[in-house]
């Protein structure tokens, strides 16, 4: 069993739809990251969470430490949101040793 | 552009050759981390530096891999006697080194070993 799992693995949505990507983990963490990776390979950090909820533009990330679960929501999705979204966790005691999930490939169709 | 640069962006080499990649982090960042990402997978931690000190290495980093950060600024990752299984994207990230600090990723170096 992978230490960080994501669902769904692939997601296709119509422009404007509300999107949710889920992440669950089985290790003790100090922080959880949501990252966006575009086809060229570049990775952008979207959020770093240790509790509660964060919002940036149309993106919302939540985390439930007790349930070891996080969600990334995209409101009013747009084709430019098409990318791979990766959930990653920093292990307790080490913010630098990050374990990455397998990613969720999102395609938003006009 | 996150401010982290990597060179080269692509490298094709024959099996058995040595390759070296370079990462230039954001200038004030103390921590520098190397990851490897194979097709369809999330990145995997390889090693990280706090200034010039290499503090942790993954078991993924075989004896053929070596990383340095001699002056605490840029870092190099060398792979000796490359194997086809080394083909991957090699990502570098940097951070200030404070607790709860986000990492900034470079564009990666894509290695193909023929």
Image (cartoon, rainbow, N blue to C red):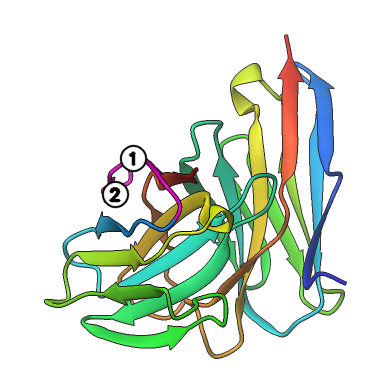
Q: Secondary structure at mark 1?
A: loop
- Letter of the chain that mark 2 sits on in the rendering: B
Report the front residue among B83 and A9.
B83
Is residue B13 magenta-colored? yes
Rendered position, B97 above or below A16: below
Please tell me which residue is depicted at 49% across the width and 72% down the height of the picture: B46
Please tell me which residue is depicted at 32% across the width and 79% down the height of the picture: B49
Please tell me which residue is depicted at 43% across the width and 81% down the height of the picture: B99
In this picture, residue A33 sits left or right of residue B72: right
Q: Secondary structure at mark 2?
A: strand
- The label number, if any, that marks residue B45 in the structure image: none
Q: Which residue is mark 1?
A: B9
Do labels 1 and 2 touch, CB within 8 Å?
yes
Position of residue A95 measured from the top left corner of the image (x, y, whole percent)? 50, 78
Report the front residue among B27 and B24.
B24
Quarter the C terminus of chain A occupies: top right
Please tell me which residue is depicted at 50% across the width and 43% down the height of the picture: B114
Quarter the N terminus of chain A occupies: bottom right
In this picture, residue A33 sits left or right of residue B107: right
Q: What residue span does the magenta drawing correspond to?
A: B1-15
Q: Which residue is mark 2?
A: B6
In this picture, residue A13 sits left or right of residue A58: right
């Amino acid at each position: 069993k992978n230490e960080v799992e994501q669902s769904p693995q692939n997601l296709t949505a119509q422009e404007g739809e509300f999107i949710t990507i889920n992440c669950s983990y089985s290790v003790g963490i100090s922080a959880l990251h949501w990252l966006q990776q575009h086809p060229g390979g570049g990775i952008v950090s979207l959020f770093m969470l240790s509790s509660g909820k964060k919002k940036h533009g149309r993106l919302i990330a939540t985390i439930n430490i007790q349930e070891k679960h996080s969600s990334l929501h995209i409101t009013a999705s747009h084709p430019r949101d098409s990318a791979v979204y990766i959930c990653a966790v920093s292990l307790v005691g080490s913010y630098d040793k990050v374990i990455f999930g397998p990613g969720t490939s999102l395609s938003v169709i006009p | 552009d996150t401010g982290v640069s990597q060179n080269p962006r692509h490298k094709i080499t024959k099996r058995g050759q040595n390759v070296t990649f370079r990462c230039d982090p954001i200038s004030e960042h103390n921590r520098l981390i190397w990851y490897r990402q194979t097709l369809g997978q999330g990145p995997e931690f390889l090693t990280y530096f706090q200034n010039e000190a290499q503090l942790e290495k993954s078991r993924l980093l075989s004896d053929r891999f070596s990383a340095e950060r001699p002056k605490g600024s840029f870092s190099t990752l060398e792979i000796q006697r490359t194997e086809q299984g080394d083909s991957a994207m090699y990502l570098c990230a940097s951070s200030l080194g404070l607790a709860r600090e986000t990492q900034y990723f470079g564009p990666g170096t894509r290695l193909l070993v023929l």
